[in-house]
Image: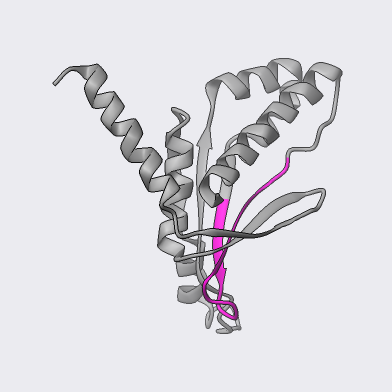
Amino acid sequence: MTDRARLAILLVTALLVVAGSPAERVRAEPGGGMKIVAVEGAFEDVAEYVADAIVNRGLVIDYRGYIGRMLKRTGADAGSAKPLYRDAQFFQFCSAVFSRRTMEADPRNIAYCPYVVFVYELAAKPGTVHVGYRRPARTGSEQSRKALAAVDKLLDAIVREATE
């Protein structure tokens, strides 16, 4: 089998997985600091859709954090065992291209790297999974604002791919 045939098979398989996603868009939350989309589906599936959406862009997930597990494990020690999430994770990654553009525009834009997309399912609302990210503030010069807008667009595309 040729490399081209393997790539075609992988692309078709990826499209079928995304198209067959049981997640259904519920709502998008407006807000200045975050973008969060809620979908109906299994948490594990939606979390994998997020991972796939990141990797599909040629990006590498540097770290996958299990926030929900940590909160369950440390609740009593922190003075509250109240369950917040059924599960909650985040994906940390970077893009050399986007990061270089933002930091060349303004070295202080290092504050926006690495990028993080989070996924959570509330304990009180099982079956609804939230996917989102912190929106980078569009500050500085015109070049900086454009570069940060491109990062926002990248993160938005990842969330949309994972939740559509």
Q: Is residue 116 left or right of residue 29?
A: left
Image label count: 0
47 or 88: nearer the eye? 47
Magenta range: 118-135
Residue 132 is covered by the magenta coloring:
yes
Vertical arrangement, residue 141 with respect to residue 158, above or below? above
- Left or right of residue 158: residue 30: right
Residue at 56 percent across and 40 percent down: it is: 158
Q: Nearer the viewer, residue 16 or 106?
A: 16
Question: Residue 53: horizontal and vertical position, in percent?
Answer: 48, 40
User: Where is residue 40 shown, x and y percent of the image?
Assistant: 54, 65
Tell me where residue 95 appears, x and y as whole percent: 54, 27
Q: What's the residue at 35%, 31% (across, down)?
A: 11
Residue 48 included in the magenta stretch of the image: no
> Between residues 92 and 25, which one lies in front from this camera angle?
25
Reply above or below: 55 against 119: above
- Classify the position of the N terminus by image quarter: top left
Q: Nearer the viewer, residue 31 or 16?
A: 16
- In this picture, residue 48 sits left or right of residue 74: left
Q: Residue furthest left?
A: 1
Q: Main secondary structure of the magenta part?
A: strand
Q: Residue 101 in the image: x percent, y percent?
A: 66, 18
Identity of the residue drawn at 51% across and 62% down: 67
